[in-house]
Amino acid sequence: MSLNRTPDKEPADGAPAPRGDAPAALKAWDAPVLVIHWLNVVAVILLAFTGGMIMFSDALRMGVRDTEVMLKTLHGAIGYVVVANLSVRILWGFVGSPTSRWRAVLPNETVRRQFLADLSGLLRRRPEASLSRLLFSRVVTTIILILFLMMAGTGLFRTASDLFHPPFGGLIRDFLAAPGVDPASLNPMDPTGTDPKRWGLMMKLQGHVVGRLHRWGAYSLLVLAALHIAGAVMTEARSGGVIGPMFTGLRNRPRRKR
């Protein structure tokens, strides 16, 4: 999934013009953003695969505790990669190159004004008027970012409550341990040695609240991923210059008319 987008405007007229007939290569995305993007793509695919195996473990005849613990451990390990990746992307949005900054990715006042101007032109039936995709693409990017944050938070909680993994696993293990029981003796996904009331409360919180948020967030993210891919392919087929920059970080500046 992408938390970046192609620059909106060409360089100013004062920028150096390309020599000869070859168009100049312009930076669309920098190297850190490209690495983050493709790491997210691989991670989301692996998370969807392992998450599906966990969800349908009974139908796949893998519904034994040790196998489920193994699958959730693998799923959680991939989730840690996403959390680290997301953390770097958030930081890079403040200190990275101009095209990777949050002001170039998320909706802002300039984008809002452009959208209203385009909408006004359409309502007045001006022949040259068209509705820019800029606001839509930035809103979708914002939704993807929110979904990633929600998935990261709920995933960390599920990993902690299921497997007692950091950063919250120790706190949850201490909360669940029955009086007189050493919290370190508790096993993942096993109520033995836990306080029955606290275990029941944790299972309800995990399954009915956090679990549903995590599951529906995953569904929403996969739908947006499909729309993102479809939009990229359609734009590439119509005008080009979309898929190539996702690998190289560069796009060609259109030749100027003479």
Image: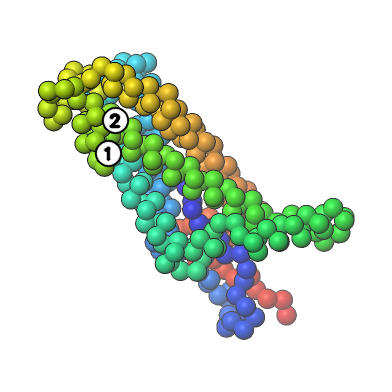
Q: Nearer the viewer, residue 16 or 65?
A: 65
Q: Position of residue 38 (x, y in %)?
A: 41, 51
Q: Is residue 207 above or below residue 10?
A: above
Q: How many marks?
A: 2
Q: Position of residue 120 (x, y in %)?
A: 81, 57
Q: Secondary structure at mark 1?
A: loop
Nearest the eye: 15 or 173: 173
| Residue situated in front as seen by the camera: 229 or 219 | 219
Q: Is residue 70 visible?
A: no
Question: Which residue is located at x 42 percent, y 39 percent?
Answer: 151
Whether residue 73 sits left or right of residue 238 in the image: it is left
User: What residue appears at the point 31 percent right and 44 percent down from the top-left corner?
Assistant: 80
Q: Which mark is residue 168?
A: 1
Q: Amino acid at mark 1?
A: Phe
Tell me if residue 155 can be seen.
yes
Quadrant of res 199 = top left
In the image, what residue type sits under mark 2?
Answer: Ser
Work out which residue is located at the far front of the displayed protein and give it.
Answer: 179
- Image coordinates of residue 256 in percent, x first then y, are 68, 76
Measured Cα–Cα span from mark 2 to mark 1: 8 Å
- The answer to whether marks 2 and 1 mark residues whose Cβ atoms lie closer than 8 Å is yes
Name the mark on residue 161: 2
Q: Residues within 10 Å of mark 2 (few under 14, many from 20)?
A: many
Please say if 225 is above or below 191: below
Q: Is residue 150 left or right of residue 6?
A: left
Decide: is 154 above or below 133: above
Q: Is residue 43 above or below residue 52?
A: below
Residue 257, labelled with which disc? Answer: none
Task: Tell me the quadrant of the picture where the C terminus can be found.
Answer: bottom right
Question: What's the residue at 72%, 76% (across, down)?
Answer: 257
Q: Say which residue appears at 30% left-offset and 37% top-offset.
A: 76
Circle 2 — which element? helix
